[in-house]
Image (cartoon, grey):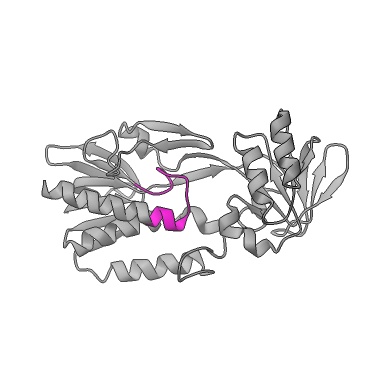
Amino acid sequence: MSFDAVIVGGSFAGLSAAMMLARARRSVLVVDSGLPRNRFSSHSHGVLGLDGIAGSDLLRQAKAQLLDYSTVRWATDTVIDAQPTVDGFAVTSASGETWAARKLLLATGITDVLPELPGLAERWGHSVLHCPYCHGYEIGGGEIGLLGGHALSSMMAGVLADWGQVTLFAHGMNLDEETLATLQRRGVRIETEQVVALEGEAPQLSAALLADGRRIDLRALFVSARQQMASPLVEQLGCELDESPVGVLIRVDAQKQTTVPGVYAAGDATVMGNITLASAEGVRAGVSLHHALIS
């Protein structure tokens, strides 16, 4: 089958882009593997009008509304190849399906690469977190930690002080006097001993175990996980990437066009953000893609 656009990824950015194209009466195929980045969190916060909704429920509602549009098709599958053609792209899935598309939108997202720390993975999205604006309020104050050792650690530690009493686990970081003074003003404690394990009844967290045997009581631990592309399709197509403080992002222009003609991108793979920002970027990409189809 042939479509005006094939969208790879059916989470918040992909759905938002598809909605714009559907409302322009364009034929759209959304191909999604069913593994959204936020699947580890039970609820989503800071979503205007839907604060506290489960991300899975929000995606389910959005998908149902999108499929009410007659020009939209959905495939639960994984795209493994996309090749340029005279008229656009030939897109192939893991199940052997092949579709033709005039334009291609990558809403494939990113994968969080977690630190190899015993007890961390089973608490990810519950009491080990990455975004205070998404989850900080629900912690309810008290003792919280930040696992340091990355470029944003000192800045993030100061920000986190609005959500609780912060301990920054430096993990080898060298903090200059100005940074130390800023953190002191914010009431941030610095711990130089390495964290070797997380303790508590998972998925809850009660303490961080240090290399010297001490335990630091914690209600939550924030981690800036490294990010990598969730799909090899991005680099297979030749899309250029930019370095960010936590990994790589697809390089796009203001219209969400990648460095490969006819290939657009939106969502977590292009911007460090949340549900709202991913959705907004998807809207922008869908509108830009529609303009490109006209021109």
Q: In the figure, 59 relative to 115: above or below?
A: below
Does residue 177 show up?
Answer: yes
On the image, the x and y values in percent for residue 271 come to 43, 44
On the image, the x and y values in percent for residue 264 come to 28, 43
Q: Main secondary structure of the magenta part?
A: loop
Q: In the figure, 221 relative to 74: above or below?
A: above
Q: Classify residue 253 as left or right of residue 114.
A: left
Q: Residue at x 12, y 41 (%)?
A: 87
Nearer to us in this view, 175 or 206: 175
Q: In the figure, 212 relative to 39: above or below?
A: above
Q: Residue furthest right?
A: 213
Q: Residue at x 20, y 41 (%)?
A: 89
Q: Classify residue 117 as left or right of residue 34.
A: right
- How many numbered discs sit on the rendered protein? 0
Nearer to us in this view, 25 or 34: 25
Q: Quarter of the image containing the N terminus?
A: bottom left
Nearer to us in this view, 101 or 131: 131
Please identify the quarter of the rendering in which residue 232 is found: top left
Q: Quarter of the image containing the C terminus?
A: top left
Q: Classify residue 63 as left or right of residue 248.
A: left
On the image, the x and y values in percent for residue 294 come to 11, 50
Q: Residue at x 51, y 56 (%)?
A: 38
Q: Residue at x 46, y 67 (%)?
A: 48
On the image, the x and y values in percent for residue 143 come to 77, 55
Give yes or no for residue 268 being in the magenta stretch: yes
Identify the magenta region: 266-279
Does residue 31 show up?
Answer: no
Give yes or no for residue 14 being in the magenta stretch: no
